[in-house]
Image (spheres, helix red, strand yellow):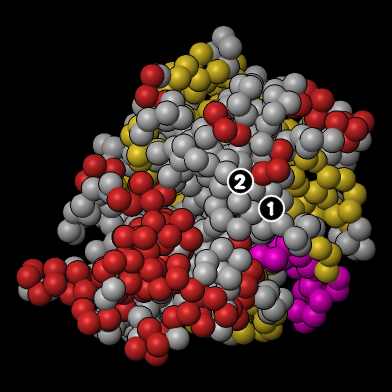
């Protein structure tokens, strides 16, 4: 009987209470080393069958939810879509306070990958938030009232913040995103009390070399860019998510993203490695001065960011114990570096990768293959743009010595735009989106995206076990001293696996898809596991198959938990478009325009997961005011900004025709198949890389 086991364990736990430190989840990765490992073990292989939902909190949004909850002294602090914050009683889920920074809806257009936020930082009596519009905000921890707010970005440029701040002493560290549109990357330290900037580290040079006196590391970086670099794009290199900190070395590690734009032949026509894009940089936390760097993908041309989660630990390497930093960046190689010096210790493929044969340990560089260069022909390159691993954090168990990585196994046809010109109002990746859409292979019914939970031995650089999913998103991971690995799924389960062999021990359906990483904490001797739910982001917006309305939630589980999950909220799909509305003459033009301006949010082939509306199911009212929406921006407050800077009335009519055509086609397919294929928002079979 699970309850008997649970009760026994509760008694045992009362006798051996967990320490105060182990009870909280005070930092983004629980500790500065970002291991995402909970030392709690009340929930373990024996007791886990008694695990159940104990409370659910509805956040009131239906966009992507990516936050790591912070739990300090019995209170849970969560950020939701649109950079809102709630403080909850971590025992009951009861709301203590909420805060809305009132990010303008128009700002949604600058978000490459949904209006997500990956969490707050808590330190002293303050909560720190990075808002989508570039503000860094300090809140009073007990009331949620604003203490100070500072604009960390140039508001004339499409900068966004989606990452969680990190606090080190009196400094709060924050980066930003926007490389796909064209911005210059940096991260900064602000004073926790005053909000005053203490230092800033630019990840790429600017055209103005006089800046190098203030940041000497830019001199070394500048030497890796040509004079004719695409300066107006800002060059990218945004540090939009990953940080780790070693207090002994006083080194702050930052993961740096891709260049702007992707195609290096255009971004950097004179060649060069393009530092510090796609790199891990280690800076002195007091001064922001560079101590070492390691570039995972020199001259990146594939959106192979090194912004993925980094973990610090000690490993035996050739019989010697080394302090290491580990990362599984998008490029498909798992890296182990000496974190004091940046020396590369090992690198092996953790997913299929065809762009490089191996990493040369002498030079520290990947050896590119002949398929890597897509500058003058379309190439299927693995991993895909989403990477072998994206923002969803991995976890490390010091008990098993394994890293648990949410992996993605896909390939992607990189297609260069031969007529590329920088345009500040669109994505600037250098890809030919109209060509990509025109030649997109058919989407396989019922087939989504191969994602996996991969257990990796970092010392031996080899896979130990793997669990396979047919999901668009491989969710963030938690490891615990109870011998468990915890991960959510796109189709609404929270699942628990044995850490040694990946056997499924327990799962519960909560009726909302999960992509965020779970956490664990304890209050009065009871261990909880909590996670935020809600699909979205770049993967969840496109390559998923959501049949529900995606209501954002926070879920908490404990032994003996008996709460009911929210009922499923089916998504109703009705096509209001009719053949008579078609003006086929412009649909082809509309398809090309859609590919450039609409695809990244509303989905390829006019099919989305529905997190951002699938336009085929537009209501009659929306069809009637199509032009007012796209040109006049009447839905701007909901995130649909005006495109008057990019599209005229004829363009908008053409896009409308294209969407109507796709809607009518979906209806025909559905009729023929005897069911709706409209919800199939997966990937073509050709995009699988097993
Ligand atoms: Ca990117």
Part of the protein shown in magenta: 120-148
Depth order, front residue of 255/182: 182
Which residue lies at the image location 49% right of the left edge and 74% below the top edge?
649
Task: Indicate which label's residue lies in the foreground, 2 or 1.
Answer: 2
Rendering coords of residue 115 (x, y %): 56, 66
Disc 1 marks which residue?
176
121 drawn magenta: yes
Label 1: few (<14), some (14–19) or many (≥20) C-alpha neighbours in 10 Å: many
Label 2: few (<14), some (14–19) or many (≥20) C-alpha neighbours in 10 Å: some
Depth order, front residue of 637/598: 598
Q: Sequence order check: which comes first, mark 2 or mark 1?
A: 1
Task: Evaluate whether residue 60 shows in this view.
Answer: yes
Which residue lies at the image location 77% right of the left edge and 51% below the top edge?
173
Disc 2 marks which residue?
422
Question: Is 200 above or below relative to 383?
Answer: below
Rendering coords of residue 596 (x, y %): 46, 56
Left or right: where 150 falls relative to 375:
right
Task: Evaluate whether residue 46 shows in this view.
Answer: no
Which residue lies at the image location 51% right of the left edge and 13% below the top edge?
360
269 drawn magenta: no
Depth order, front residue of 45/660: 660
């Amino acid at each position: 009987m699970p309850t008997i086991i649970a009760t026994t364990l509760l008694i045992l736990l009362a006798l051996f209470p967990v320490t105060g430190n182990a009870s909280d989840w005070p930092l983004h990765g629980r500790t500065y080393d970002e291991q995402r490992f909970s030392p709690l073990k009340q929930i373990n292989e024996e007791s886990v069958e008694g695990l159940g939902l104990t409370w659910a909190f509805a956040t009131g949004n239906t966009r992507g939810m990516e936050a790591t909850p912070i739990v300090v002294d019995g209170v849970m602090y969560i950020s939701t879509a649109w950079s809102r914050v709630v403080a909850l009683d971590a025992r009951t889920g009861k709301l203590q306070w909420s805060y809305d920074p009132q990010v303008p809806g128009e700002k949604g257009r600058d978000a490459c990958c949904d209006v997500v936020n990956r969490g707050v930082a808590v330190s002293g009596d303050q909560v720190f938030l990075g808002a989508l519009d570039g503000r860094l905000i300090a809140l009073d921890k007990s009331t949620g009232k604003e203490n100070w707010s500072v604009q960390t970005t140039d508001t004339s440029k499409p900068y966004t913040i989606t990452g969680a701040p990190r606090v080190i002493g009196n400094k709060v560290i924050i980066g930003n995103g926007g490389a796909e549109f064209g911005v210059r990357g940096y991260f900064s330290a602000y004073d926790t009390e005053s909000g005053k900037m203490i230092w800033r580290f630019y990840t790429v040079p600017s055209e103005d070399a006089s800046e190098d006196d203030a940041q000497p590391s830019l001199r070394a970086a500048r030497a890796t860019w040509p004079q004719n670099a695409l300066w107006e794009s800002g060059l990218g290199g945004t540090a939009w998510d990953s940080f780790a900190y070693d207090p002994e070395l006083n080194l702050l590690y930052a993961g740096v993203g891709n260049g702007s734009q992707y195609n290096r032949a255009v971004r950097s026509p004179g060649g060069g490695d393009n530092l510090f894009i796609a790199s891990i940089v280690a800076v002195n936390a007091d001064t922001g001065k560079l101590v070492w760097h390691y570039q995972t993908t020199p001259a990146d041309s594939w959106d192979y960011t090194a912004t993925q989660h980094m973990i610090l630990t000690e490993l035996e390497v050739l019989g010697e114990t080394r302090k290491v930093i580990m990362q599984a960046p998008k490029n498909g190689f798992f890296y182990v570096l000496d974190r004091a010096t940046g020396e590369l210790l090992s690198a092996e493929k953790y997913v299929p990768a065809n762009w490089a044969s191996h990493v040369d340990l002498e030079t520290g560089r990947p050896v590119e293959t002949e398929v890597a260069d897509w500058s003058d022909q379309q190439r299927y390159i693995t991993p895909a743009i989403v990477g072998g691993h994206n923002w969803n954090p991995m976890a490390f168990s010091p008990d098993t010595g394994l890293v648990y990585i949410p992996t993605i196994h896909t390939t992607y046809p990189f297609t260069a735009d031969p007529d590329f010109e920088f345009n500040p109002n669109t994505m600037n990746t250098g890809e030919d989106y109209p060509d990509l859409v025109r030649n997109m292979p058919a989407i396989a019914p019922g087939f989504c995206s191969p994602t996996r939970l991969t257990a990796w031995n970092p010392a031996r650089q080899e896979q130990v076990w793997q669990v396979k999913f047919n999901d668009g998103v491989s969710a963030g991971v938690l490891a615990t001293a109870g011998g468990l690995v915890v991960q959510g799924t796109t189709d609404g389960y929270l699942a628990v696996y044995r850490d040694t062999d990946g056997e499924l021990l327990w799962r519960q359906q909560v009726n909302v898809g999960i992509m965020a990483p779970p956490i664990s904490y304890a209050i009065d001797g009871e261990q909880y596991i909590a996670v935020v739910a809600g699909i979205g982001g770049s993967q969840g917006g496109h390559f998923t198959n959501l049949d529900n309305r995606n209501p954002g939630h926070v879920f908490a589980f404990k032994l003996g938990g008996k709460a009911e999950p929210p009922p499923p909220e089916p998504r109703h799909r009705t096509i209001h478009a009719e053949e008579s509305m078609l003006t086929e003459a412009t649909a082809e033009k509309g398809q090309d325009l859609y590919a450039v301006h609409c695809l990244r949010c509303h989905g390829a082939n006019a099919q989305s997961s529905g997190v951002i509306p699938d336009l085929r199911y537009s209501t009659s009212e929306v069809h009637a005011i199509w032009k007012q929406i796209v040109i006049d921006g009447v839905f701007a407050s909901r995130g649909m900004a005006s495109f008057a800077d990019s599209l005229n009335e004829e363009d908008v009519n053409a896009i409308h025709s294209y969407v109507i055509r796709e809607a009518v086609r979906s209806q025909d397919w559905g009729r023929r198949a005897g069911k709706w294929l409209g919800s199939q928002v997966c990937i073509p079979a050709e995009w699988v890389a097993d």
